[in-house]
Amino acid sequence: MRDLREGLGLTMRDVLGASKQIARSLRNANYVVLPSRLSDIEDKGKTPNLYRLHALSLVYDCRVEKLLNFYSIK
């Protein structure tokens, strides 16, 4: 997933900022993707919750299904 983020030219701080905007607009703090959590997702293979998965799909401008493929979920 790191390759996807870096391919888009996004830093972890960029993802944090964008996810905060999403959380604000949806009035739900569960959408915030903190850098420490993103690091766990990218480096340790932690599975994001549904809120973060949705936020990441919006930030990366891709379908949730594409992100689910990283976890062999189709």
Image (cartoon, helix red, strand yellow):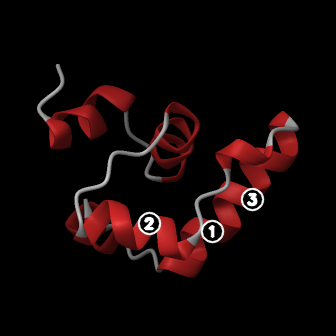
Rendered image: mark on residue 38: 2
The structure residue drawn at horizontal position 34% and vertical position 60%, both measured from the top left corner, is 41
Q: Choose between 11 and 42: the one closer to the eye.
A: 42
Quarter occupied by residue 52? top right
Q: How many residues crowd mark 2 within 10 Å: few (<14), some (14–19), many (20+)?
A: many
Q: Mark 1: which secondary structure?
A: helix
Sequence-wise, the earlier of marks 1 and 2 is: 1
Label of residue 74 in the image? none
Residue beneath label 3, please? 20
| Residue farthest top in this picture | 74
Please say if the residues under marks 1 and 2 sit with CB atoms less than 8 Å apart: yes
Q: Is residue 22 left or right of residue 4?
A: right
* Residue at 58% from the left image edge and 80% from the top image edge: 13
Circle nearer the viewer, 2 or 3? 2
Q: Amino acid at mark 3?
A: Lys
Q: Nearer the viewer, residue 7 or 48?
A: 48
Amino acid, disc 1: Leu
Q: Quadrant of the C terminus?
A: top left
- Label 1 belongs to which residue? 16
Residue 35 coordinates in the image, percent (x, y): 53, 75
Give the amino acid type for the residue marked by disc 2 in the picture.
Answer: Leu
- Residue 71 vertical position relative to residue 19 in the rendered view, above or below: above
Disc 3 + disc 1, Cβ < 8 Å: yes
